[in-house]
Image (tube, rainbow, N blue to C red):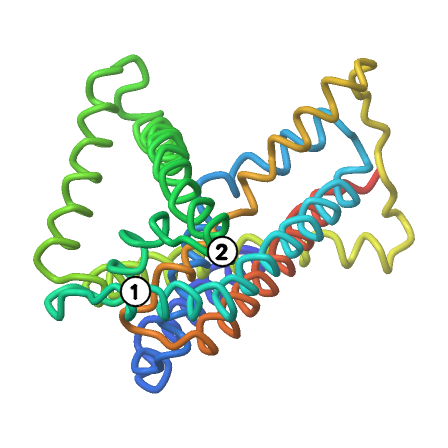
Amino acid sequence: MSLPSLIVLATAFVVAGVLLFYRPLAESSSWRAIVTPLASIMGSGFLVCAPLLYANVGNYAVWAMGGLLVLAYGVGSVVRFNIRYGEPLFARHSASKGGSQDQHLLHVNHCHSAQHVGPAGAAGLLEKTSHIVLAGAYCISVSYYLQLLASFGLKYIAPDSIWLGKMLVTLILAGIGVVGTLRGLKGIEKVERVVVGLNLAMIAALLAGLVHYNLPAFFGGNWQLSAIAIPEDSSHIIRLVMGMLIVVQGFETSRFLGAEHSAEERVRTMRWAQMISTVIYVVFVGCPWWPS
């Protein structure tokens, strides 16, 4: 077996072993809170971000990805602000209305927020409206990414079978629904921990292979950027790059983990999830430069 293959396999096994079987990490509340937004950020879109960027912005791909990540971090800051200051506002309103003890506090807050009359009335209406819009966006996003996953998974098995891909997507959605119904948020977090562990192990192995390929070329003096033609339609490029914001989003899921994690923990772990994904995306997009 060649040295590059050994590096890739060793990296995958070591990272997977630590993330899946290291007990202090598995039992860490902070890691569980990181896993949910990280799973959303590091989804199937990770597979297509580099080819799309290089095909449309050429050697500016790293800068385009960096700009998207900075924008995403800014949006994340808004979500973290809402966790810190918006949730207590809705919680006070819910307490004044009186909520059922059988319902989680955040659920009661969301139900009553739009009814609030006073200084927070506009915020309450915006809160409820944003949840409706977000639910629709998630339906589209999850369906798209699962279809993408199915197309990759079935590419060499049944490339022309559309119904098989739809069946696989349906089974995945049904499985998520069953786990959520029977086991709640903790059950979903356990599934996410396994999926994220395997995903990060494969990503680490891929990055290790790319770094191993590029570093010798760099220090050997024969590393350089190849010229890549890009489309002349600048408006198309702008629309595509901005549309790729969906690839680096998903951090907002921390907003809805209040049943298991405190506000400060969600703020801190969302920030960590964004920083971890930022490093991975920048290195991933920056490594596929071929030496001459």
User: Quarter-wise, where is residue 277 in the image?
Assistant: bottom right
Q: Secondary structure at mark 2?
A: helix
Q: Nearer the viewer, residue 211 or 187?
A: 187
* In front of the other: 10 or 42: 42
* Residue at the spot 59% in from the left edge and 37% down from the top edge: 49
The answer to which of marks 1 and 2 sits earlier in the sequence is 1
Seen at 35% across and 74% down, the residue is: 261
Q: Which residue is mark 2?
A: 251
Secondary structure of residue under mark 1: helix
When the figure is inspected, residue 284 is found, relative to residue 137, above or below; the finding is below
Q: Are marks 1 and 2 in contact (CB under 8 Å)?
A: no
Question: Mark 1 sits on what residue?
Answer: 94
User: Where does the image place residue 79, in percent across and percent down from the top left?
Assistant: 53, 58
Residue in front for this viewpoint, 265 or 13: 265
Residue 259 appearing in the image: yes
Asked if 154 appears above or below 87 in the picture, the reply is above
Q: Position of residue 190 (x, y in %)?
A: 24, 65
| Nearer the camera: disc 1 or disc 2 | 1
Q: Amino acid at mark 1?
A: Ser
